[in-house]
Image: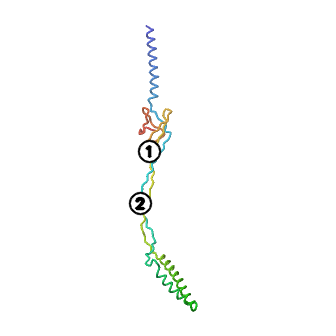
Amino acid sequence: MKKPIIVGGIIAALGIAGGVAVGAYQSSESGPRYADIVSVDPIVQTSNSPREVCKDVTVTHQRPVKDDHRIAGTAIGAIVGGVVGNQFGGGSGKKIMTAAGAVGGGVAGNQVQQQMQQGDTYQTTEKRCSTVNDSKEETVGYDVRYRYDGEVHEAKLDDKPEGDRVLMRDGAPQWQDDSQS
C-alpha cells in the first residue's frame, strides 16, 4: 500500500509543478504586449487654389491724330522757311534761297508737328486682373513604422500616434487604445 501512495504523491507533485510552470509561462504571455514606434513621418499634400487679383494702373494714351500726313506743319514750315530764305541772296539767288528755305522749312515743320502729335497724350486708370495660385500644404496622415517581435512593420494613420509605443492585441496594433504609454 505504501507504493501506490508514494507513486500517487509523486504524480501529484509533478502535476502541481507542471501546473505552476504552465501558469507562469501563460502569465508572462498574458500581460500587455507593446510594439516600439520607430518613426512617424507626416504625409503632406499640396493644393493650389486659383484666385483673381485686380489692381488699378495708369495707362498713357496718344490722342487720335487729325492730320496723319502732317500737312499743316509742312505748309507752315514751308511758308516760314520761304520767308527766311527770301531774306538772303539777290536776283536769281534770291529765288533759289527762297525755294531752299521753303523746302527746308517744310521738312522742319513736318518734324515739329510729328513730335507735337506724339507728345499729345492723356492718361486713364484701368483695372488689370490676373490669376494667381495660392499653394497650401496640409498634413493628411502619417506613415508610421513600428517594431514588434524583432520585425519592422508599417502603417498609414490619419492621426499622429501618441507616445513611443503601441499596445498589441492578437498581433495587431491598437492605435486607438488609450492605454499607450
Q: In front here: 147 or 93?
A: 93
Q: Which mark is residue 32?
A: none
How far separated are the C-alphas under marks 2 and 1? 31 Å
Q: Is residue 86 above or below residue 147?
A: below
The tally of labels here is 2
Q: Position of residue 109 (x, y in %)?
A: 51, 81
Q: Which mark is residue 52?
A: 2
Q: In front here: 90 or 47?
A: 90
Residue pictured at 43% horizontal, 72% vertical: 124
Q: Position of residue 180 (x, y in %)?
A: 45, 38
Neighbour tally class for label 2: few under 14, some 14-19, many 20 plus, Cα within 10 Å = few
Q: Amino acid at mark 1?
A: Gly
Residue pictured at 48% horizontal, 34% vertical: 148
Dot 2 or dot 1, earlier in sequence: 2
Give the quadrant of the N terminus: top left
The residue where tag 1 is placed is: 141
What secondary structure is found at the residue carrying circle 2? strand
